[in-house]
């Protein structure tokens, strides 16, 4: 596999059929992803690049690299729009907030227009917050209906929990059955805070889905999601574009 993700004729991937790239460590993952994002931004030739960001310590390395001198001035931030795959219903100043993490690691270090950053709203009523974010996505997309061949996102970054969850699609939550909404919410039984999340249909409307996973503790769940018929939320991820697993050696079982 090349050091950049290229287009190919095999469109439409699931969590089981996606490509796997195993890199040496989390630093190599960040370097690969930063290079890929720059490549995709250049490929768009001035058109907006829409990225749905993930929370967690592994993508944080990517955000720190994108905010460093190596990339901060090379990225066409005026053409890049940053969205969020999920968010906890806590203030944006809270240390548990994905937006807070992204702000500290990336946004504070780059010259990106305010209008290009799209945090998920935080309200006491998560269903209302989800409606507001969906309306924002629909306005940007230009339609209330997702159309095949017209992806909502260019890149969706996803993590993977030890219980098989991704974004805030947790086992046993009603959001897993959602067929129509682009954005909804969940209340995990074994994790704090109500959460807003992109749904399966919104994630599927993407050019590239990238699972970014590191650490030996994730090796077994990755194998089960990819190779076994188990009902993990992450196992149901699919995209009309391409899906890639970007792993370090420990997560890749090497």
Image (spheres, rainbow, N blue to C red):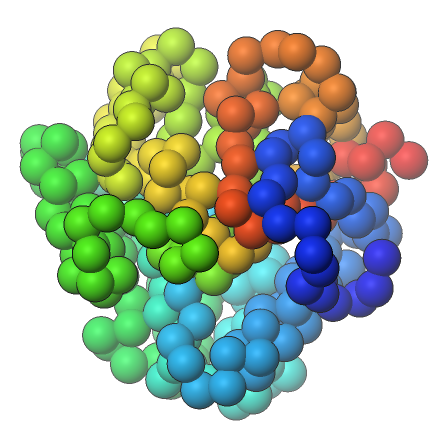
Q: Choose between 211 and 42: the one closer to the eye.
A: 42
Q: Quadrant of residue 104?
A: bottom left
Where residue 211 appears, as percent x and y from the top left, is 61, 43
42 shown above or below 254: below
Q: Quadrant of residue 20?
A: top right
- Total numbered circles: 0
Q: Nearer the viewer, residue 61 or 168?
A: 168
Q: Kindly identify the residue that appears in the image at 28 percent across and 81 percent down.
A: 113
Quadrant in which the C terminus appears: top right
Q: Is residue 100 above or below residue 79?
A: above
Left-right relation of 92 to 51: left
Q: Is residue 77 above or below residue 144?
A: below
Residue 241, image x, y percentages: 56, 51
Q: Residue at x 55, y 66 (%)?
A: 64
Taking 163 as reference, is 26 left or right?
A: right
Q: Residue at x 18, y 39 (%)?
A: 130
Q: Is residue 245 visible?
A: no
User: Can you see residue 82?
Assistant: yes
Query: Foreground: 244 or 143?
Result: 143
Q: Quadrant of the N terminus?
A: bottom right
- Give the left or right position of residue 211, taking residue 92 as reference: right
Residue 4: x %, y % from top left: 74, 67
Q: Which residue is found at the position 26% from the left and 39% from the top?
A: 183
């Amino acid at each position: 596999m090349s050091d950049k993700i290229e287009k190919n004729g095999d469109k439409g991937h699931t969590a089981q059929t996606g490509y796997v790239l195993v890199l040496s460590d989390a630093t190599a993952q960040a370097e690969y992803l930063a290079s890929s994002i720059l490549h995709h931004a250049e490929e768009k030739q001035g058109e907006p690049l829409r990225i749905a960001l993930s929370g967690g310590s592994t993508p944080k390395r990517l955000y720190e690299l994108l905010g460093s001198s190596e990339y901060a001035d090379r990225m066409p931030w005026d053409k890049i729009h940053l969205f969020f795959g999920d968010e906890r219903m806590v203030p944006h100043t809270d240390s548990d907030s994905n937006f807070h993490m992204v702000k500290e690691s990336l946004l504070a270090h780059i010259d990106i227009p305010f209008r290009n950053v799209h945090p998920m709203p935080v309200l006491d009523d998560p269903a209302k917050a989800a409606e507001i974010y969906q309306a924002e996505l629909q306005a940007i997309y230009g339609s209330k209906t997702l159309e095949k061949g017209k992806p909502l996102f260019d890149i969706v970054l996803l993590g993977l929990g030890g219980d098989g969850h991704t974004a805030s699609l947790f086992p046993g939550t009603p959001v897993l059955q959602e067929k129509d909404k682009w954005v909804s919410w969940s209340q995990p039984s074994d994790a704090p805070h109500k959460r807003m999340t992109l749904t399966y249909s919104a994630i599927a409307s993407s050019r590239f889905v990238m699972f970014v996973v590191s650490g030996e503790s994730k090796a077994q769940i990755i194998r089960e999601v990819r190779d076994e018929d188990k009902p993990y939320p992450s196992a149901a991820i699919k995209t009309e574009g391409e899906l890639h697993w970007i792993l370090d050696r420990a997560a890749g079982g090497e």
